[in-house]
Structures are given as structure tokens and as C-alpha cells.
Amino acid sequence: MTEVRFAQHAPTDSFRVVAGEIAPGGIPITRLAERVGRTPFYVYDRAALTARAQALRAALPAALHLHYAIKANPMPAVVQHLAGLTDGLDVASAQEMMVALDTGMAPEHISFAGPGKTAAEIRRAVAAGITMTAESEAQLDLALAAGSAMGIEPRIALRVNPAFELKAAGMKMGGGPKPFGIDEAKLPALLDRMKAEGIALTGLHIFSGSQNLKPEAIVDAQQKSYELARGLLAQWGRPVRWLNLGGGFGVPYFPGEQPLDVGPIAGNLHDLCERAEADIGAPLVIELGRYLVAHAGLYVCRVLERKESCGQVFLVTDGGLHHHLAASGNFGQVLRKNFPVAVANRIGEPANEVQSVVGPLCTPLDILADKMQLAHAEPGDLIAVFQSGAYGLTASPAAFLSHPAAAEVLV
Ligand SMILES: *Cc1c(COP(=O)(O)O)cnc(C)c1O
């Protein structure tokens, strides 16, 4: 496939280029915009989703279970497609659970993590027969109460908050005081209680962080997670169905970042899967969100006005942070950096003009590209933000300033 080259960003080979236009699913972007009927929209490329999942499976051990964490992109059509390419789905709300169940994925391959589950959500999870990942003893008790009320044995996993932190992660979700999981130090007493009460344990879940581009840091976290779980499961001394070592695979967003080298991680997982077979007799699971979907998505908006102010060119578009908070730099970033952005219908033209792409909101935060080298653009042209398949529409404040919603399409 044609790579779209950027001066500073990692190149992307997820989308074809047809007649000088980015062509998701082979459809030139101006024609796709006509089909969608409006801008802005998100487009996700089915072939790119398939290619990523297949490449990953080819590298990973066959015994490893690959799950998709659907909060990264919960569009039902995307989740349906990924359900056919993965071994399980991880959800973080009852609504995500409904989307996951609609795919036909077997309930025993769906698990529900999250620190703030209500009694009603937990009851729905138990009724559905999915795995309720208890992030506290209180959640465990709610699941047990729901199970006895309905006469069902709930599937319960425990999420462990490990004492170690994931090095070099974009977002840390384990180590020290955290709202996620049950502190490692509290696990032995809890496992004793479960044994005494005859409660079955489906598995242990250790997720220590997200958006990591350093393979050695992910290997280190998986290694430590495995050792921690092995010790706890030795104490448990009874069978479990799986051990979930988390994920954290990052994708390159910003200038200078390189794609994650999965090789060393896969090598380590080959060793760990063999050990897991011998030590605990249950498969290992990893759960990935953005790594499976980010590359396959574009956010597309239209230039409304080309405007010059004090020598700087602004392309004012109909899209912005209300649909794509991450690209504006306001979703957890400390310093704002540009996502890869291009004038989608002028890919054949040289990107040799410094322009800024902004949205329609009355706030200086509404920036999609700050002083970037782009092809010369005029009103009516289409701007594409790459790496937008994860944490896009549903991770953005769509109601802020009450502009129209963005459409979504899978091609
Ligand atoms: C958010 C989340 C994921 C997915 O993280 P990515 O960075 O998108 O891969 C996986 N597991 C849990 C428990 C999560 O909260």
C-alpha cells in the first residue's frame, strides 16, 4: 500500500491513495464525503483493522488469547468486525457490554473491568454470564449478592493493583495508590475468604498502564505481572480459567515517535505462555485497545475559511476538539504536539506551506494542527487527522458549544 509520508511523523501505510486523494477502503475521500452526506466524520478502514490483528496474531504465541478493549472504539460495526479477529472482548460499562454481546461473542469471553460499577450494572453482568472483574471487595460482594438473588453462580475475576509501576507509560494504571484493582497486599486475605466461602475464581487481571512505546518496559511489566500472579495462584491452589496480563501497546502519534517493535514482547510471551501452561494450566490473555484500532481511523473535516492573521495562515474547519479531543492536545497530554494531519484531497501536492488547522469553537484550545507543513488548502478542501481510530469520538466533549455531531463510517 502507498505510504503517506510526513516530514516528522512516522509514515502511515493504512490507507490507499487514489488519484491524489486518501482513499479509505479504496474510496477517494471527496467521494466518501458525498456518501456520508456531511462533514465532519470518522472513517475506519476494515482492511486495516484486519491486517493489524492478523499481523499481531502471526507474531504472538498461538496459545495466547487476544482481547479487544472496546472503550478504544466502541462503534458497533467496528466491535463486530474485531469480534471475528480476537478471542474476547473487554468492556468498561453495561452499555459496552450490550454492544459486545450483540456481536455474538460468547459471554464467557467477555469481561467487565472498571472501578465504579453500580449494583445494577453488576447485576446485568451476572445475568449476562460475562466475567465480572471485581476491582474491590465491595464489587465482589455485589456480584455474589446478584448471583444469589438470581440463583446463578457469577463468574468472578479479581483485578490486582500491583505494587510496581509500568515504566515509560503514557498513562499509569497500577502501582501505589490507585482507584483501580485491589492492592496486591490485600489479595492473600481475600483469596482465603473466597476459598472459605467456596467462591470460584475465573482469573486474575493485572493491567498496569497504557500507550507504551518501549518494548522492554512492556516485557518488564508482563514479567512482573506474571510472577505476581503466579505467587497468588499458588496460594489459591485451585484452577482458574485464565490470567490476564494487560496490554499497554502504544501507537506513534507525535513527531519523532516510532511504531512499537512487537518482536521482543512476542518473544517474551512465547516463554510466558509455556510457563503458564506448566505453572497454572490456564492460558494467558492480553487486552489491547488502541493498538488494534488507532491506525485504521481518520477524522475528516472540511475547510470553511482560509484566514490570515499577523502573517499566520489559519484553516478554519467545521471539525475540532468537540469531536477529537486527543488531536487538540487536551486528552491527557502535558505539552501539545501535532497528530499527523494532511489535506486529504491534495495528497499528490507538495506539503510545503505552513498552515494551522483550527475548529469552530470559541476557545484557543480548538487546534487540530499548529503551524504544520501542509499542502496549500482552500475552502471546501478536506482535512484528515491520522491515528484517529482510538479514543476519538467517544473520548471527546461532543456537547461543548452545541455544534452538530460527527458521523462514523466503517468501509
Ligand atoms: C483502557 C483499558 C485498556 C485499553 O488500553 P489501550 O491503551 O487502548 O490499549 C485495556 N484494559 C483496561 C483494563 C483498560 O482500562
Image (cartoon, rainbow, N blue to C red):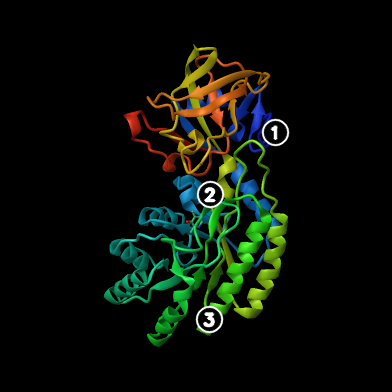
Left/right of residue 325 with respect to residue 356 in the rendered view: left
Q: Nearer the viewer, mark 3 or mark 2?
A: 3
Q: Secondary structure at mark 2?
A: helix
In the rendered image, which quarter is residue 5 located in? top right
Instruction: Give the residue at mark 1.
Output: 3
**Is the residue marked 3 within 8 Å of ligand 1, measured from its CB?**
no
Residue occupying image coordinates x 49% and y 58%: 173
Left/right of residue 352 with respect to residue 338 in the rendered view: right
Query: Mark number for residue 81?
Result: 2
What crowding class fits label 3: few (fewer than 14 Cα within 10 Å), some (14-19), or many (20 or more)? Answer: some
Left/right of residue 359 with respect to residue 28 in the rendered view: left
Q: Where is 60 relative to 241, above or below?
A: above
Residue 238 at least partly seen: no
Distance (Cα) linking label 3 and label 2: 32 Å
Q: Earlier in the sequence, mark 1 or mark 2?
A: 1
Q: Residue 209: percent from the left, percent from the top?
A: 54, 56
Q: Earlier in the sequence, mark 3 or mark 1?
A: 1
Residue positioned most to the bottom:
196
Q: Residue 358: percent from the left, percent from the top?
A: 48, 24
Residue type at mark 1? Glu
Q: Where is 49 relative to 323, above or below?
A: below
Q: Secondary structure at mark 1?
A: loop
